[in-house]
Image (cartoon, rainbow, N blue to C red):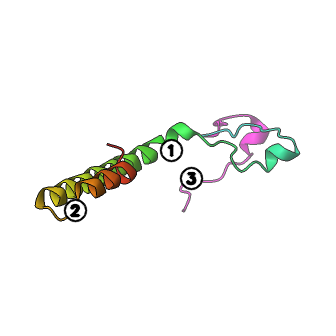
Amino acid sequence: MVCCQRPRKLGAKYTGQDIAPDEFVQPSLDFDYEGKRDRWNGYDPAAYRHVVDDYQKVEDAKRQLKAQKIDAALMDGAVDESVAKVLLACCCDC
């Protein structure tokens, strides 16, 4: 990127004029040996919660679909009633 302003005669750090603050000042982190190597440092589980909720919805939909298929097979007579109870008990927590 090209700067369109001419350079100052004296730098701002020497004159103290027009020194703008940084956009974001990094916090000073003083960790011990383990703190520097902690891979979960700064992890916020609340930020990941929406991903877990999305997968939970998908799993619930799969369980409902499987329960509907077992019920349909039971109505058609393709599956015995005792087998259907076992399938519903182990696969679908309905």
* Residue 76: percent from left, percent from top: 11, 61
Does residue 39 appear to the left or right of 71 in the view shown?
right
Q: How many marks?
A: 3
Q: Which residue is mark 1?
A: 48
Would you name the residue on which mark 3 appears? 5
Residue 65, magenta (yes or no): no
- Give the number of the disc on residue 79: 2
Residue farthest to the right, as pictured: 33
Of the numbered discs 2 and 1, the one sitting upstream in the chain is: 1
Q: CA distance from mark 1 to mark 3?
A: 45 Å
Q: Position of residue 1 (x, y in %)?
A: 54, 62
Q: Secondary structure at mark 2?
A: loop
Main SS category, magenta section: loop
Residue at 54%, 62% (x, y): give it.
Answer: 2
User: Is 2 covered by the magenta stretch?
Assistant: yes
Cα distance between the residues tagged 3 and 2: 82 Å
Which one is closest to the eye, mark 1 or mark 3? 1
Pick whichever of labels 3 and 2 is earlier in the sequence. 3
Residue positioned 33% across, 47% down in the render: 60
The residues colored magenta run: 1-22
Q: Quadrant of the C terminus?
A: top left
Q: Residues within 10 Å of mark 3 (few under 14, many from 20)?
A: few
Report the mark closest to the observer, 3 or 2: 2
The answer to which image quadrant residue 16 occupies is top right
Instruction: Tell me the element at label 3.
Output: loop
